[in-house]
Amino acid sequence: MNQFEDAYEQYKLQGTQQAKKEQPTNHSGKEEIIAVRKNENGNIIAVKTSSGRELDYPTALSEAKSGKLENVDVFHKYGRDILRSEPDGIKENNLDELPEF
């Protein structure tokens, strides 16, 4: 690596560390998604919540839209609604990075 790459990697590391410190705790009492189920193509088809409920993807979308799930957003792309983690700079809590059930 050269000095520019080293500097950028250090910058990213510091940002990730700070994002983890700033990550809000769930005081709302809403459920969070803690695990996912994927199909053979790697698409998320179901989620598991912090209370142990297993929701198919359309139900999870509906609950996220109605504000029942914490730390996720719904946005419209490719002609459909898509569920994703709220951007917070922490890769480990992205939906694709969560453990599978």
Image (cartoon, rainbow, N blue to C red):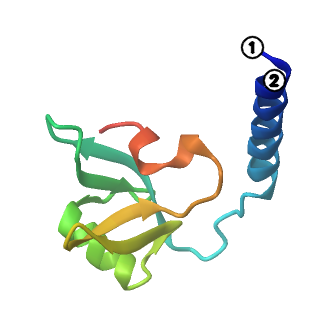
Circles 2 and 1: CB distance less than 8 Å?
A: yes
User: Which residue is the extreme one toward the left?
Assistant: 40
Could you give the CA–CA distance between mark 2 and mark 1, rounded to whole angstroms? 6 Å
Which element carries disc 2, helix, strand or loop?
helix
Q: Residue at x 78, y 46 (%)?
A: 15
Q: Seen in the image, is 63 located left or right of residue 79?
A: right
Give the number of marks. 2
From the image, which quarter does the N terminus lie in?
Answer: top right
Q: Position of residue 27 (x, y in %)?
A: 67, 72
Among the two numbered marks 2 and 1 on one chain, the one whose residue lies closer to the N terminus: 1
Comparing 52 with 17, the one in front is 17
Specify the amino acid type for callout 1: Met
| Residue receiving disc 2 | 6
Mark carried by residue 1: 1
Comparing 74 with 25, the one in front is 74
Q: Position of residue 93 (x, y in %)?
A: 54, 47
User: Which residue is the extreme one toward the top?
Assistant: 1
Q: Seen in the image, is 18 located left or right of residue 50?
A: right
